[in-house]
Image (tube, helix red, strand yellow):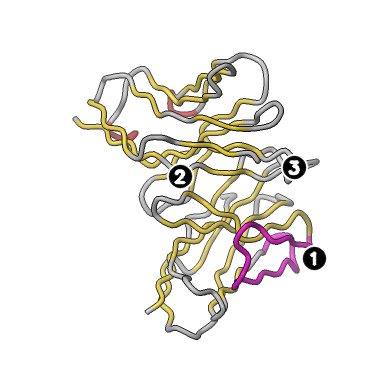
Amino acid sequence: AQSVAQPEDQVNVAEGNPLTVKCTYSVSGNPYLFWYVQYPNRGLQFLLKYITGDNLVKGSYGFEAEFNKSQTSFHLKKPSALVSDSALYFCAVRDLNTDKLIFGTGTRLQVFP
Amino acid sequence: DGGITQSPKYLFRKEGQNVTLSCEQNLNHDAMYWYRQDPGQGLRLIYYSQIVNDFQKGDIAEGYSVSREKKESFPLTVTSAQKNPTAFYLCATDRGLTGNTGELFFGEGSRLTVL
């Protein structure tokens, strides 16, 4: 069965420092991977996705994610964090049998001034 | 503006009552979804619909019902059979025209509290 895991409930980083939010996946076949962000009491917003091709995917708001097949990871990164990046981040994988997204449990990112 | 409108934003319900959450979209997207969000559990799929007059159960459909009479509308009814209905409910669409892309658009959510 397809699944994603987000091993950290919360990540704390100082403004201006690089940030990484971790995601690992388990799929049979080639993975379709996604990152979404959720601000308090709002719906989720799509950030970026990996389907195939370059392992470094660039997305919205300066975020990027690195696909690593050998480590089955798809970590979200940003070179310089902003306080406004503080939010809940979800990794997701597309279930190739049902064509539906399977979401991780989310990681709360807190950026301190 | 194009988007997804969920209403009400907040809803309180007594035990034993059915409630209906509205989801309307003007994005002209075919696929629509209902998710439930609980703290620490991520999003779980309740129901989804690929086309009008057709819908499928997701992972946690028990105690819920939906209809898809119009492309723009996908209301969710939380019935009294749902044992733990207090949650944040999210409606979403997929912009794919010939198939799902995984790039979902979400509404602002409806927070249901059972008293």
Q: Which mark is residue B31?
A: none
> Image check: A16 left or right of B12?
left
Image: A20 above or below B54: above
Same chain, labels 1 and 3: no
Q: Which residue is mark 2?
A: A105
Instruction: Work out whether residue A90 or residue A78 is closer to the camera in this orientation and state it.
Output: A90
Please give the range of residues in magenta: B52-73
Foreground mark, 1 or 3, reads: 3
Picture residue at 43% right of the left edge, 73% below the top: B11
The span from disc 3 to disc 2 (Cα, nearest Å) is 21 Å
> Image check: B43 left or right of A100?
left
Q: Is residue A79 in the magenta section?
A: no
The span from disc 1 to disc 3 (Cα, nearest Å) is 23 Å
Amino acid marked by disc 3: Asn
Task: Give the chain letter at badge 2.
Answer: A
> Image check: B105 left or right of A112?
right
Q: Are marks 2 and 1 in contact (CB under 8 Å)?
A: no
Q: Which mark is residue A97?
A: 3
Identify the image quadrant of residue A52.
top right
Foreground mark, 2 or 1, reads: 2
Q: Which residue is mark 1?
A: B53
SS label for mark 3: loop
Task: Give the chain letter at badge 3.
Answer: A
Amino acid marked by disc 2: Thr
